[in-house]
Each structure stands twice: as C-alpha cells, then as structure tokens.
Image: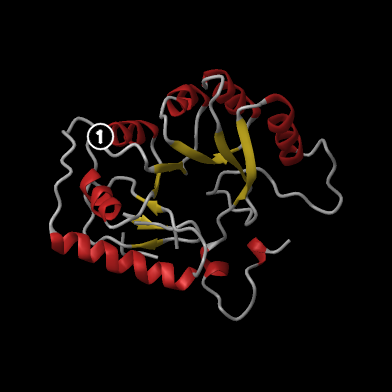
Amino acid sequence: MLLRSSARALHCSSHARHIATSPILYKMSAPMDLAYTSDRQAELRENIESVQAEIDAARLVAISKLKPASDIKALYDAGHRHFGENYIQEMVDKAAALPNDIHWHFVGSLQSNKAKLAASVPNLFVLETLSSAKVADILQRSMASDGSLGVYLQINTSGEDSKSGLPPLTPSSTRSDLAAELALHVLDSCANLRLQGLMTIGSWEASHDPSKPNPDFTM
C-alpha cells in the first residue's frame, strides 16, 4: 500500500511514501480475503502514523493499488477511512467487499469508457484526476439525480511528459484556456459534480529538495 508521499508501500495525498513492505500483486479473479495478522496491522499503523506526523493536519489518503483488501481492512479497523485506487475494476471489486463507509479516492487516469463504471461505486468520494469535459459529462449522466461526487482538475505543473494533466494557468490565461474551460464546464453543466480544487504531482527532484520551496506547488 502507498501513502502519497517514497518507497516502502500505502501513499498519502502529498508526494509518494510507501508504507507496506513486500509487493503483493492484486488479482481480480481472486476471492477477497479480509483476514490480516496483528503484526501486519501494527506495521501498517506505524507507517501511516509516521507519515501523518510529517504532514500535520493534512488529510492522509492511503493509496492501496495492487494491495490486498486485507491491508485496507487492517487500517480500516485501526480507524483509517480514506483510501485511493488507480484502477477502476480493482476499486469496484474492493468497494463491494469492504465496509461502505470507506471514502474512495480515484487517483488514476480515468478513460471515458470507464467513467460510467466509476460512477457506479456508491462510496466514491472524489475523482482526483479530471482532465476532460467528456469524462465529466459521462459522470454527470451516470449519477443518480441526488448523487454528488467531488472532483479535482488534474494539472501538470511540472511539465513532465510522463505525467497526465492539463497545462497550468498563467497570469495571462483567459477563460478559453483548457483548465479554465473545464472548470467552467463542471460548474455550469455538471450539477452533481462538486469542483473542489486542483490536483498536481510535483517532480521527484523538486519534491525532495528541502533547500527551497517546490516550484511545482507555487502559484
């Protein structure tokens, strides 16, 4: 499991710190075994608490992609509620097997042909990677009339080709710039989507240079 912040396994919503140890590949066809050992729970709990101490009051999202549902259940039983997934089918399967008060964050690239499936997860809390009006429209059409889903617009502030996302706005940006256009589309045409802000991932180098502010997170 990754805690978005380096490389041990569970991620938090800041950078990329891993909290688990040995990689465990997720198999969609495997039955969901929610059993865990007390040692495993203690290991995960210690790791998540160490990351939480670093980020102070920020919400910690445990990225559980390719990790067994038992790891999620171990942290759930320890009081953690926010988990993130990169693959739609994996999130759908885990959501069906785990408690329904978990807040799921989808943090992978969401293709338009998977948007309807994403909307079918009743406790999907937020889509952190919205980057197209087409996906927004499919989500809107697929949701119940009284449904509500938080969304972040994904912005590629580091300009790296390996990262997805829209170009960042600049002081000279106008309403026709892609990010502004998408934000206005969500606000004006997607009543069941709640625009909650922007999501970006800084470059590895900038995120691990304590000598100066991270330019990827500077307005």
Which quadrant is home to the C terminus?
A: bottom right
- Label 1, secondary structure: give it: helix
In the image, residue 167 lies at what x, y percent? 69, 46
Q: Nearer the viewer, residue 128 or 53?
A: 53
Q: Is residue 209 above or below residue 3?
A: below
x then y, percent, for residue 4: 44, 58
Residue 216, above or below 173? below
Residues packed near mark 1 inside 10 Å, few (<14), some (14 to 19) or many (20 plus): some
Q: Amino acid at mark 1?
A: Ala
- The spot of residue 206 in percent (x, y) is 57, 68
Residue at 40% in and 57% down? 11
Residue at the image point whose x is 58% and y is 27% from the top:
135
- Which residue is labeled 1 in the image? 97
> Image check: 190 left or right of 173?
left
Q: Is residue 189 above or below residue 25?
A: above
**What percent of the width, then of the height, locates residue 112?**
52, 25
* Residue visible at 36% across and 71% down in the picture: 50
